[in-house]
Amino acid sequence: MSAGGLVTLMQPQRAPQGMRVLAFTVDLDRDCNVAVPGEMAAASRDRGRGVPPRHSASAEGMEAIADMLRSLSLPATVFAEGETLLSLPDASVLRGHELACHGMGHEDLTGESSGLVPDDGELRAIIRRSKEALSSRCGIVPRGFRAPYLNIDPRVLSHLGEEGFSYDSSMTAAAEEGSVTPWRLDNGMLEIPLARDRDAEGRIMDSYLWAMHEGRRPVEDYFGMLERFRAGALVMATHSWHVAEGVRDGRRGKAEAAAQTEALAQVLGRAKDLGFEVLTLEELERRFSADR
Ligand SMILES: [Zn+2]
């Protein structure tokens, strides 16, 4: 820990020789979530019935994604927001996947999106409640964290370290020459970032699959991202609800939701064909710890 107790970033470390890993991550959170100015917890986008949190698209999408992963025999890391997890009709859908934390009420931990910055006591309470949701519903002690809206800062990371988390996956790193390597924070946690590179036309492209689900990028763009990736760990991410609800289009019908799930299956199938090793983030974190 640095002076003042805040976490600072350290130099990225080298990927173990020959490592070319894909980690598929799912943020299980309230449907089409939006930050509310002056409020800690998130709302769902207003579809004509106000903004109270909705969870049905998230539950439906999680089931579809879990079925798809089973058919491909692939594990995912699921960042479960506490309230959405507790509202899931059947948590057995998560069996076989790694579970990690994503806040309790999808709180904006840095205040960047809501304008409301939680104090240290509030931060600690949010993090502890999100851990308790996972232990009470699923009987596990989570090791990983992804911040809602990916809003993370040194203070939040310090609290996460104190609460026993061993990795965070909230930052985004440039895939320099087709490589992204997790790095060690000075509180001992491993940062396993999402990736950003440039597509064939030179446009910036994120490994968060948001643009694909919103119809702004075809699946082939993500094939390209996989093909450009040569070493280290490529973390891809989606939201469970995004399969069943679009930000622009609203709630999707069955055929549309199936097409969204199929697009995810195509990306993951392509990664397998290209020889990526598919790991959960905890498996990846353990590998880096063994390598130290
Ligand atoms: Zn989220």
Image (cartoon, helix red, strand yellow):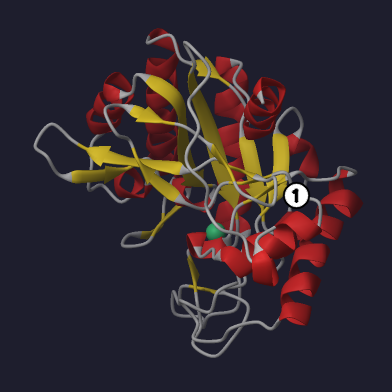
Q: Quadrant of residue 48?
A: bottom left
Place of residue 175 in the rendered image (x, y in percent of width and height, measured from the top left): 32, 35
Q: Secondary structure at mark 1?
A: loop
Give the answer, above or below, for where 252 lies relative to 115. above
- Tell me which image quadrant ligand 1 sits in: bottom right
Q: Nearer the viewer, residue 133 or 113?
A: 113
Query: What residue is pinned by disc 1?
Result: 165
- Expressed as whole percent of the image width and height from the top left, the position of residue 27 reads 57, 49
The answer to whether residue 194 is left or right of residue 121 is left
The quadrant in which the C terminus is found is top right
> Is 216 positioned to the left or the right of 187 in the image?
left
Toward the bottom, the furthest residue is 38
Query: Is the CB of mark 1 within 8 Å of ligand 1?
Result: no
Label 1 environment density (alpha carbons within 10 Å; few <14, some 14–19, many ≥20): many
On screen, residue 119 above or below 267: below
Point 69% across, 62% down: residue: 158
Res 69 quadrant in image: top right
Q: Is residue 265 visible?
A: no
Q: Amino acid at mark 1?
A: Phe
Tell which of 49 and 284 is nearer to you.
Answer: 284
Task: Name, please, the residue furthest toward the left.
Answer: 201
- Residue 152 or residue 53, whichever sits in front: 152
The residue located at (75%, 49%) in the rendering is 165
The x, y position of residue 276, in whole percent, is: 46, 15
